[in-house]
């Protein structure tokens, strides 16, 4: 796994007093220049903070405080503000959002649409890293607190290799790959990256960095060479950033708000713009109380007009039901997704489907089941794919049948290849004093035992199985993308990973754009004018959660969640994990994803999964 992240932030607290005085006079100078705003006008305030969940968190949505419950909902609020004549300006406060590169880029596009609609977008932040700076710099004006810091330092990547660690505890990896660039097993089998792994990582870094440099150059009106120099000179205090032209002003939050109010007199700041009202439980009024409780038991309503359905493939792909877990994130279950796609295909009110994929892949079997379900949809109505931060390997498998595929320029996709194998635990069992007596009937009965590596005949059989899965994978890609590919598929496959920009050049995707663009295109392809956007499967009611808990249905197929939970319950593991999460959240997230893949490999012999994780910070 790998992490692309900004270096640790540094705090700088000394600023020149004379500069602060200058800023204050600059603020006062604006008080008399703006005409009064029309009655009813408002300034919409959005706070970009915390996790940017792709799929809605169903349980949290029942008891929410009105905050957007998904990334799509936040985008829709931006779009609503752009179309709302009463909204005269937008305030954006950025507070350490956990957003991936494609999400940041789509938020940048949403800000640009606000500005194109004639809305001034004002941004304020206390601290910014490379990713959040791109969003902040997209705004009309960017302000930071006097003691703020701007940590734009370029891209930093670390790839962990665990062969030596595993050897210390008596474990060895016996992994097989189809494709010279399919390096998903390398971190467990080697101490250093192979030439192919290194070449691929360097190429991805080059393209991602070039895109970031280009963004900064465009947003601040400088050359790319100048933008590179600005990055190399980081980090910055707020004052240094102002002098370098990276931000527009320095102000404390209240001063900043007063300045904006002075520019739009008569406009009220709406900090809950467009949000749903949270449930209000009045325990002094039994009738009102039961009314609010009753709403929690209501089923999600059916669409009242033509709809575009969004179906999420969010997280590691596996057989069974999708899961959402605060510790290990989202898991995309083939059973859940098959049912959702069947529902979309059969519902006459659903005129088109957008498959939103943010997944590193996973089970090859589950990916095939989801792919098959997408083709049943495509036979009846437009099926458009929107790729998020990553749509690689199994994530590309389920995407390749889309009639039009959208990707962000920074999306990671491709990785057409498969990996298989097992972990040999014999050394660990010996250290623990565990002796095993095996009974087998059948030549290959003990093929996947953890007591020993594969025999030559077993290895040949596993490779044959993997070759078969790889051939099917390539067949699905050829069916969906054959006429669009720039070269022979084998030259593009073999586990090679691409950025979205590269994928467009080689024909693996059709267009560059985000989720909103994919939804609009789906509506156009279905020839519908006015439409609503729904999410499938429909959100569960409180009654659904209660029934699942009572019947035990909610625990079906939750192998990964259960097994990760069991590992954390081992003595000393949970405190160590919690400490790692506090000290280095990206490292913890990547470690959890690695464990997920190891556990999935125990259940299924062949995986279609990307070889590393990339996180932009």
Image (cartoon, rainbow, N blue to C red):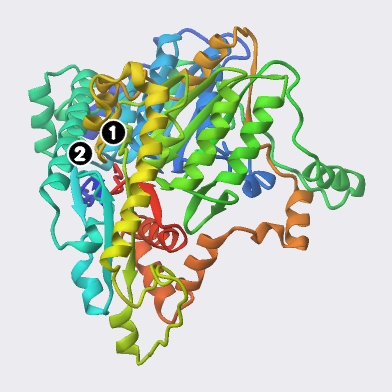
Q: Is residue 252 visible?
A: no
- Numbered disc total: 2
Q: Is 277 positioned to the left or the right of 369 in the image?
A: right
Residue 417, how many percent across, how many down? 31, 42
Label 2 near label 1: C-beta < 8 Å? yes
Q: Where on the picture, by quarter, is residue 590?
A: bottom left
Q: Position of residue 293 (x, y in %)?
A: 82, 47
The reply to whether residue 30 is in sight is: yes
| Residue at the image position 39 percent from the left and 50 percent from the top | 607
Where is residue 364? Give x, y as percent: 44, 46
Q: Earlier in the sequence, mark 1 or mark 2?
A: 1
**Residue 9 position (above or below residue 443):** above
Residue on which disc 1 sits: 133
Say which element carries label 1. Answer: helix
Q: Is residue 217 depicted above or below 250 in this figure?
A: above
Q: Residues within 10 Å of mark 2 (few under 14, many from 20)?
A: many
Q: Which mark is residue 152?
A: 2
């Amino acid at each position: 796994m790998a992490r692309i992240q900004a270096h640790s932030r540094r705090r700088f607290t000394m600023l020149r007093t004379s500069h602060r005085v200058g800023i204050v006079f600059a603020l006062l100078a604006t008080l008399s220049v703006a005409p009064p705003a029309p009655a009813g006008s408002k300034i919409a305030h959005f706070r970009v903070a915390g996790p940017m969940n792709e799929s809605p968190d169903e349980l949290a949505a029942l008891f929410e405080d009105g905050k957007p419950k998904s990334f799509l909902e936040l985008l829709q609020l931006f779009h609503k503000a752009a179309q709302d004549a009463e909204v005269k300006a937008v305030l954006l406060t950025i507070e350490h959002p956990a957003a991936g590169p494609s999400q940041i880029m789509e938020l940048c596009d949403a800000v640009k649409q606000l500005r194109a609609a004639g809305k001034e977008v004002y941004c304020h932040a206390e601290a910014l890293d490379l990713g959040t700076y791109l969003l902040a710099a997209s705004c009309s004006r960017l302000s930071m607190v006097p003691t703020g810091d701007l940590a734009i330092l370029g891209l930093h990547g670390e790839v962990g290799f665990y062969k030596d660690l595993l050897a210390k505890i008596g474990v060895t990896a016996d992994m097989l790959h189809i494709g010279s660039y399919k390096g998903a097993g390398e971190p467990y089998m080697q101490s250093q990256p192979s030439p192919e792994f290194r070449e691929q990582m360097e190429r991805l870094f080059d393209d991602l960095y070039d895109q970031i440099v280009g963004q900064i150059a465009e947003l601040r009106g400088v050359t790319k060479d100048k933008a590179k120099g600005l990055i190399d000179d980081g980090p910055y205090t707020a004052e240094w950033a102002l002098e370098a032209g990276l931000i527009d002003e320095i102000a404390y939050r209240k001063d900043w708000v007063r300045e904006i109010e002075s520019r739009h007199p008569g406009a009220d700041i709406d900090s809950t713009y467009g949000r749903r009202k949270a449930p209000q439980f009045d325990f002094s009024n039994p009738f009102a109380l039961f009314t609010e409780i009753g709403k929690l038991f209501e089923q999600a309503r059916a669409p009242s007009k033509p709809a575009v359905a969004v179906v999420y493939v969010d997280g590691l792909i596996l057989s069974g039901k999708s899961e959402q877990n605060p510790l290990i994130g989202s898991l995309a279950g083939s059973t859940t997704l098959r049912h959702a796609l069947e529902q979309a295909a059969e519902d006459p009110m659903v005129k088109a489907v957008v498959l939103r994929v943010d997944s590193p892949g996973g089970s090859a079997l589950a990916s095939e089941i989801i792919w098959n379900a997408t083709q049943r949809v495509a036979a009846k109505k437009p099926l458009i794919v929107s790729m998020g931060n990553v749509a690689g390997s199994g994530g590309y498998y389920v995407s390749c049948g889309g009639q039009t595929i959208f990707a962000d320029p920074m999306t990671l996709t491709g990785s057409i290849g498969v990996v298989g194998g097992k972990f040999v635990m014999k050394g660990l069992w010996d250290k623990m004093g565990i002796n095993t007596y095996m009974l087998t009937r059948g030549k290959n009965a003990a093929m996947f035992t953890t007591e020993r590596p594969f025999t030559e005949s077993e290895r040949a059989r596993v490779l044959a199985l993997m070759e078969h899965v790889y051939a099917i994978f390539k067949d699905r890609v050829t069916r969906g993308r054959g006429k669009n590919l720039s070269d022979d598929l084998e030259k593009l496959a073999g586990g090679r990973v691409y950025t979205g920009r590269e994928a467009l050049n080689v024909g693996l995707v059709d267009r560059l754009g985000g989720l909103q663009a994919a939804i609009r295109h789906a509506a156009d392809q279905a020839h519908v004018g006015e439409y609503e956007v729904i999410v499938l499967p429909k959100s569960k009611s409180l009654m659904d959660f209660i029934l699942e808990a009572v019947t035990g249905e909610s625990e079906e197929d939750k192998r990964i969640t259960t097994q990760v939970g069991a590992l954390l319950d081992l003595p000393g593991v949970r405190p160590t994990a919690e400490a790692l999460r506090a000290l280095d959240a990206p490292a913890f997230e990547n470690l959890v994803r690695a464990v997920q893949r190891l556990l999935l490999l125990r259940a299924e012999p062949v995986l279609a999964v990307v070889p590393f994780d990339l996180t932009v910070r």
